[in-house]
Image (cartoon, rainbow, N blue to C red):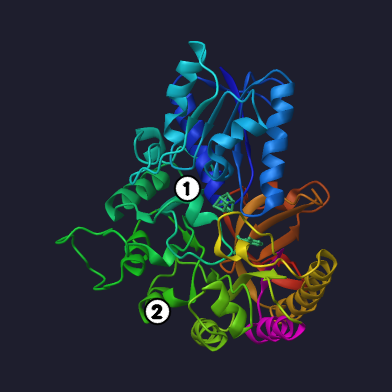
Amino acid sequence: MRFHIHTYGCQMNVRDSEAVEALLVAAGHVKAADEADAELIIINSCTVRQKAEEKAVGKAGNMIAAGKITGLMGCAVKRMGADVFKRLPKLDFAVGPRRFGLIPHLLNRIAAGEKGILEVGDDEVPTGMDAHPDVQRGGTSGMFQSYVTVLLGCDNRCSYCIVPEVRGHEYSRPAKEVIAEVKCLAARGVKEVCLLGQSVLRYGIRNKAWEPGEPNASGLTEAFPRLLWELNQIPGIERIRFTSAHPKGCTDELVRVYRECPKVCRHLHLPVQSGSDRVLAEMGRHYTRAEYLAAVKKLRDFDPEFAVTTDVIVGYPGETEADFEETRTLMEEAGFDNSFVFKYSPRPGTRSAALTDDVTTAEKERRDQVLLADQESRGQRRNEALVGTVREVLVEGPSKRNPKRWSGRDSGNRIIVWDVGENGEWVKETGDLAIGDFVSLKITEAHPQILIGVPV
Ligand code: 5AD
Ligand code: SF4
């Protein structure tokens, strides 16, 4: 069948969609040119906020109406369970986040006339992640960057978050398997890997990732730093990123890895959610404002240019103006290089859903705008400090906004663009610069979200 996959949500979903694509191709299906050309549409859904879920369900409805064979996968399926068929009675199949490996089999059942198949089990070892050699080899986009899921699920249970509900308990893939996957990616020409986990620094905590007696040249005792150290040794891999982090994971061993492993990028996405100790405690985040700031300081003491980005929720139940001000001052003290602000959205079944969602939509909107404006000026200031520095940039290709410019990222995940000249001569004529190459750029201009440079 000719298929097309629509992906909503986070990087984890992007990676899962790539795995499904690899499984379908291995089963003899063909990627469609676009949505219109496809007979089968699969929608990978997110449910982290109500709006995200509605988008995916709405899209599925449209595809069913367009006469496509339609499947819904991912987080929203797990949250809705059998109710998904109340919303979408003509949906052909629905699979939860840990069951996507079954999709090729479900298609056989659908071809035999079945409809409305639901698969939402919580396999400890998820089907599809490691079950198929093509997936294990990283059946991803075939480009120079690739995601690698290392930790599934989440055991943190923050009061507002639906993720543990829908993605199940934590399961760390064996280090041996991850290392083999990254070696295969390197052999395919991948230069940058991004290791994924909801709280990736908890790798190897709930279940062992390393077998006793596996050689340990690094001498590191913590599972995740040790994994980074091993991946840093793989020839061909030039950059290692990971997301998302929790301040408890910012250990001395992690900093040692930053010091000793040049491929490990100097950027951490460290969601803070709030700057108020009272709200943090209510959220069940297991750190205080001071502890959070200490983690940031540890990274910046090691390297003042270390990039720290974050997620913040505004309008959590009971969030007062004073709480909000604490968030503002924390963000300033932490000097975030970038931040993502979310308006609180109650999710059924979470602890905070029992609380009154008492901050009005207008007030959430206002707080959102205030934090965005703060980030604009802070981003500008932080980026101005980089003018005149030379940065190693991995080339990603023509800039989306202006095709006369090319764009790439530095180790801190900062977007840097440069002029390629009237006819793209800087790309084509001087040294065959191509997507996936490294280039040294001297920063000439700073903006809140991007830097402009010239090749040196
Ligand atoms: N409402 C609003 N934002 C949320 N997030 C998670 N759950 C909710 C919710 N119920 C945000 C957090 C998280 C990001 C991925 O989404 O900031 O870090
Ligand atoms: Fe959305 Fe969370 Fe699922 Fe990612 S893990 S797709 S953010 S609900």
Amino acid type, callout 1: Val
The vertical placement of 277 against 210, above or below, is below
Task: Tell me which secondary structure the magenta stretch mostly adopts.
Answer: helix
Q: What residue do we see at 57% from left, 84% from top?
A: 304
Q: x, y percentage for residue 59?
A: 71, 34
Q: Is residue 42 above or below residue 363?
A: above
User: Furthest-left residue in view?
Assistant: 213
Which corner quadrant of the image does residue 104 belong to? top left
Q: Residues within 10 Å of mark 2 (few under 14, many from 20)?
A: some
Q: Which mark is residue 167?
A: none
> Is the residue under label 1 in contact with that under label 2 (CB below 8 Å)?
no
Residue designated by label 1: 190
**Could one spot residue 17 in this view of the protein?**
yes
Q: Secondary structure at mark 1?
A: loop
Nearest to the observer: residue 290 or residue 435: 290
Question: Badge 2 is on which residue?
Answer: 251
Residue type at the position of mark 2: Thr
User: Where are the magenta residues, as a range?
Assistant: 321-343
Q: Quadrant of the N terminus?
A: top right
- Say which residue appears at 71% left-offset and 79% top-offset: 382
Residue at screen point 24% across, 59% down: 210
First along the sequence among labels 2 and 1: 1
Residue 340 among magenta residues: yes
